Image: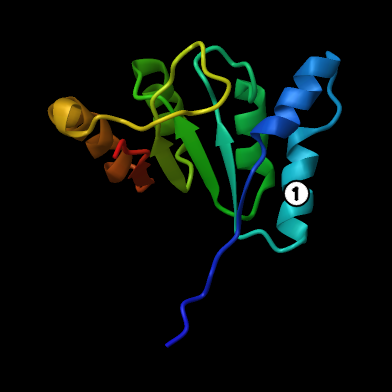
Amino acid sequence: MAIKQRLGINIDHVATLRNARGGNYPSVVRAALMAEAAGADGITAHLREDRRHIRDADIEALMEGLTAPLNFEMAATAEMHAIALRLKPHAVCIVPEKREERTTEGGLEVLADQDRLADFILPLSEARCRVSLFVAV
């Protein structure tokens, strides 16, 4: 039996370019809608604590405008937890964040933080968000 492969597009660096230009172009939402129209099965956006790529308004606009599922990447912080529970994206991917990294490097130390992560994940699951973890190996 053939397994259907799915294509997810990460739009973070569209936001990087927009932010570097200091304006609203290119549009993160337009890029996501174009990817969706071209056949993407899902869109990924990482709302970092320092908002250096994606911004809060981007996530809200993506939630309103997409028909494809949104995979909301986020750190395991109270602020991000509240945003995810308010917006209820299709999926949440919990990732570590370090201020000095350009993009996510390495994963979560799940065993060392399993109790806190379990408490963090339960309300997300109850809100019917799929939850995945970016895990250290």
Q: Nearer the viewer, residue 66 or 132?
A: 132
Label 1: state its secondary structure.
helix
Q: Residue at x 44, y 16 (%)?
A: 98
Q: Does 75 sit above or below residue 65?
A: above
Name the residue type under label 1: Leu
Q: Quadrant of the N terminus?
A: bottom left
Residue 86 image position (x, y, % from top left): 44, 30
Q: Nearer the viewer, residue 106 or 91?
A: 106
Q: Residue at x 35, y 48 (%)?
A: 128
Disc 1 designates what residue?
A: 33
Residue 19 image position (x, y, % from top left): 76, 18
Crowding near pointer 1: few (<14 within 10 Å), some, many (20+)? some
Residue 97 image position (x, y, % from top left): 43, 20
Give the side of residue 50 with respect to residue 135, left or right: right
Q: Does 82 sit above or below residue 39?
A: above
Question: Which residue occupies the extreme front position in the image?
Answer: 137
Q: Quadrant of the C terminus?
A: top left
Q: Does 67 sit above or below residue 53?
A: below
Q: Quadrant of residue 118?
A: top left
Residue 91 image position (x, y, % from top left): 44, 46
